[in-house]
Image: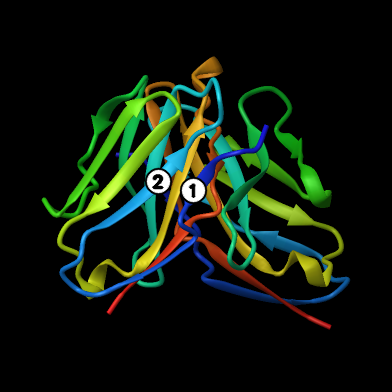
């Protein structure tokens, strides 16, 4: 069965510091991979997605993610975090005959 | 496009009452998903439709929950009777088949409180 693991429930960073949120997946083939962001009181918004090709994917708001097949990972990164990035981040994997499976989410806390 | 529209945004009801949540997907999208989000269980897929037909309702917690999609532009999630443990945020999302990517667009959610 497909699954997505986000090992960090909470991540705390200082504003201006770099960020990496981890995501590992278990899937029968190369899945489509997604990162969503959820700001307080709002729905999930797509940050970026990977289908095929270049394994480094650029998204909105300055985020990027790298697909590493050997590690079954799709980690999200940002070189310099802003206070407005504080939110819940969800990784998802799916595609083909499978609808996306979501991870439990990682809560990002940004200190001034 | 206005995006996925959900109503109401907030619902407070007493235990035993019927609750109906509504969703209007993005025009042209042929998949519709209902999710429930709680602190304890995270984001759970309840049911999804393809071309108005329910495909998988294995996530519906019990018979008190039902969902319908009478046409391509409207879906409801009903809880009857409601219980305090149903308190959660319920999201509707839609996607288009193209590329089988299932990139989903989420509505703002309905925060349900059952007292």
The residue positioned 24% from the left and 47% from the top of the image is B59
Circle 1 sits in a helix, a strand or a loop, which is it?
strand
Chain letter for the residue marked with disc 1 in the picture: B
State which tag comes first along the sequence, 1 or 2: 1
Displayed quadrant of residue A71: top right
> In this orientation, does residue B43 appear?
no
Circle 2 sits in a helix, a strand or a loop, which is it?
strand
The colour scheme of the drawn protein is: rainbow
Position above or below: B113 against A59: below
Q: Is residue A49 left or right of residue B7?
A: right
Q: Is residue B101 left or right of residue B62?
A: right
The residue positioned 48% from the left and 37% from the top of the image is B24
Image label count: 2
Position above or below: A73 against B111: above
Q: In this view, does B36 lie to the left or right of A7?
A: left
Position above or below: A80 against A75: below
Displayed quadrant of residue A28: top left
Say whether marks 1 and 2 touch (CB < 8 Å).
yes
Q: Estimate the spatial distance between the alpha carbons at disc 1 and disc 2, rounded to whole Å.
A: 6 Å
Identify the residue under disc 2: B22
> In this orientation, does residue B101 appear?
yes
Q: In the image, residue A106 lies at what x, y percent?
A: 56, 65
Chain letter for the residue marked with disc 2 in the picture: B
Identify the residue under disc 1: B6
Outermost residue toward the top?
B98
């Amino acid at each position: 069965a497909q699954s997505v693991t986000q090992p960090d429930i909470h991540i705390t960073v200082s504003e201006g510091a770099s960020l990496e949120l981890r995501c590992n997946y278990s899937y029968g083939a190369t899945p489509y991979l997604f990162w969503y962001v959820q700001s307080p009181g709002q729905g999930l918004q797509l940050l970026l997605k990977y289908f095929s090709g270049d394994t480094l994917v650029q998204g909105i708001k300055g985020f990027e993610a790298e697909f590493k097949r050997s590690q079954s990972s799709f980690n999200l990164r940002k070189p310099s975090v802003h206070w407005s990035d504080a939110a819940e981040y969800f990784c998802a994997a799916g595609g083909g005959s499978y609808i996306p499976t979501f991870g439990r989410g990682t809560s990002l806390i940004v200190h001034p | 496009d206005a995006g996925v529209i959900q109503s109401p945004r907030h619902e407070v009801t007493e235990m035993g009452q019927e609750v109906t949540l509504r969703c209007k997907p993005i025009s042209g999208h042929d998949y519709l998903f209902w999710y429930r989000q709680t602190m304890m269980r995270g984001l759970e897929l309840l049911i999804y439709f393809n071309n108005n037909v329910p495909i998988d309702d294995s996530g519906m917690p019990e018979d008190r929950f039902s969902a319908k999609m009478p046409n391509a532009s409207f879906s409801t999630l009903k809880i009857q009777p409601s219980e305090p443990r149903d308190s959660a945020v319920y999201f509707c999302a839609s996607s288009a088949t193209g590329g089988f990517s299932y990139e989903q667009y989420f509505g703002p959610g309905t925060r349900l409180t059952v007292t």
